[in-house]
Amino acid sequence: MRSNARRPGTSAAMPRPSRRGAIAVYVVITMLLLIGFLGLAVDTAHVRTTAQKLQAAADAAALAAAGLVMQDDPATDYLATRQKAVDIALANSAAGAPVQLDFNMSNSIDGDVVVGQWNRSTRVFTPTTLSPDAVMVQARRTSTSIGGEIGLFFGAVFGQDRSGVARPAVAQYGTGGGAAVLVLDPSLEGAFDVRGNPRMRVPRNDIQVNSTDACAMMMNGAPDDPRVQARRINVTGNFCIPDGSASPAPVAFQPPIPDPLEGIPQPDPASMPNLGGIRAPGVYDAGYYPTGLDCNDGVVFLNPGVYVFGPPGVEVHGDCVLQGSGVMLFVDMGARIVISGDAPGLDFTPPTAGLYRGISIFQHRDNTLACDISGSGLFNVPGTMYFKRGHLGMDGNVDRSVGRVITNTLLFRGNGRYTITGEGRDEGPMAAYLVD
């Protein structure tokens, strides 16, 4: 009988070569997987970065070209416009090479530089050489573009060593009516600030933040929760927000939009009847109220016209509601708007004609005081609220509807829902604006 006892002086059996070979295979497979995942991450980041740079090039080229298109010579097929787009694109780079555009003299919709017309209502760009007012630029690194596709670092491992990337932009020469929320401060951090869990919806228009700060637009809260939604969000500087908290994602380093109401003269109180102040419910006429409005209950109804309020301004508290039709409130120096309480409300429409058509609230351009809107009452102001150098703060847990907002700085907080409809004053200086 064979004994299983180990002979003296002998050692334990060594691992079989097949086991060592299997471990080596596992190690190789694991390394290949790790390399594959790393390569995928690197190539994905490369494609994303290239796309961002192509978008910046397309935006800049479209803006520059749109500034020329209405003055260009149709007989040349808008050669100067196309040349400007090509030159500006070349000043930008993507994937380590200048961005190259084709002139597209045939003006094909699939070309790199396309002149045409932009319809704001339908948001449709139509290629045409008959009185064009807009330019579409498609910055591309594709198989059919001048620069060709971009190379991938690890794509060959998966049988694909190149990738196509393209980004379009449309700019129109006209007024700045596309921005229903315009924050004017040129340099402040958090010029546009959203805190807590408010919801802002700008369904048909853009948000524009002119500040050049690295955190010009700020938001807190959880990622992947789109608390701010607009047609487009442009920031002249950059933004500091959780991923997915704004939809679409803001576009940084965009040109500022000038104040569209800068040229409108301010009301002159000296030319208006002096009506003292408003301290009780009732019906009131347009005029100069040097001691302001202070209401705590009932309805203050304003007849059509312009109302100039001196200090302390417009204070609506308790369950007072300010109503009217065809009304503009002018907040003079030293005055401000304060809305607070259980059920205070503003519910009035702006003038539909005349110098102040479409404007609901106009704060003196040198007045830096803050407008503070809180409480839980009705708030329906379908015109433009204009605070050239002031701050607008809106707080609370109710729904509010505003036509347009033009302000130096802006803060939304609380849990309310804000709809910016795009109604109100829709004009400004002629310039090139990104529209898509």
Image (cartoon, rainbow, N blue to C red):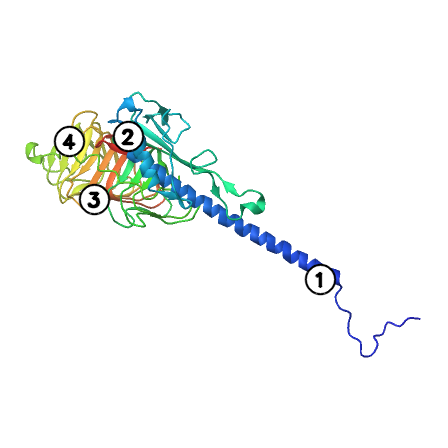
Q: Going from the N terminus, do you reach mark 3 or mark 4 first?
A: 4
Say what amino acid the circle numbered 3 marks. Answer: Gly
Outermost residue toward the right in this view: 1
- List the residue tagged with mark 1: 20
Residue at mark 3 to residue at mark 4: CA–CA distance: 20 Å
Mark 3 touching mark 4, by CB under 8 A?
no
Whether residue 179 is visible here, answered yes or no, is no
Secondary structure beneath label 2: helix
- List the residue tagged with mark 2: 80
Q: Going from the N terminus, do you reach mark 2 or mark 4 first?
A: 2
Q: Nearer the viewer, mark 1 or mark 2?
A: 2
Q: In the drawing, does residue 12 fall left or right of residue 192?
A: right
Q: In the drawing, does residue 189 fall left or right of residue 19?
A: left
Answer few, some or many: residues within 10 Å of disc 3's Cα (few below 14, many 20 plus, some between 14 and 19): many
What x and y, as percent, mark residue 406? 24, 38
Outermost residue toward the top in this view: 130
Residue at 28% over, 40% down: 255
Say what amino acid the circle numbered 2 marks. Answer: Ala
Mark 1 touching mark 2, by CB under 8 A?
no
What x and y, as percent, mark residue 375? 29, 43
Q: Nearer the viewer, mark 3 or mark 4?
A: 3
Say what amino acid the circle numbered 4 marks. Answer: Val
Outermost residue toward the bottom in this view: 8
Q: Going from the N terminus, do you reach mark 3 or mark 1 first?
A: 1
Q: Going from the N terminus, do you reach mark 1 or mark 2 first?
A: 1
- List the residue tagged with mark 3: 390
Residue at mark 3 to residue at mark 1: CA–CA distance: 74 Å
What x and y, as percent, mark residue 123? 36, 27
Answer few, some or many: residues within 10 Å of disc 2's Cα (few below 14, many 20 plus, some between 14 and 19): some
Residue at 67% over, 56% down: 25
- List the residue tagged with mark 4: 306
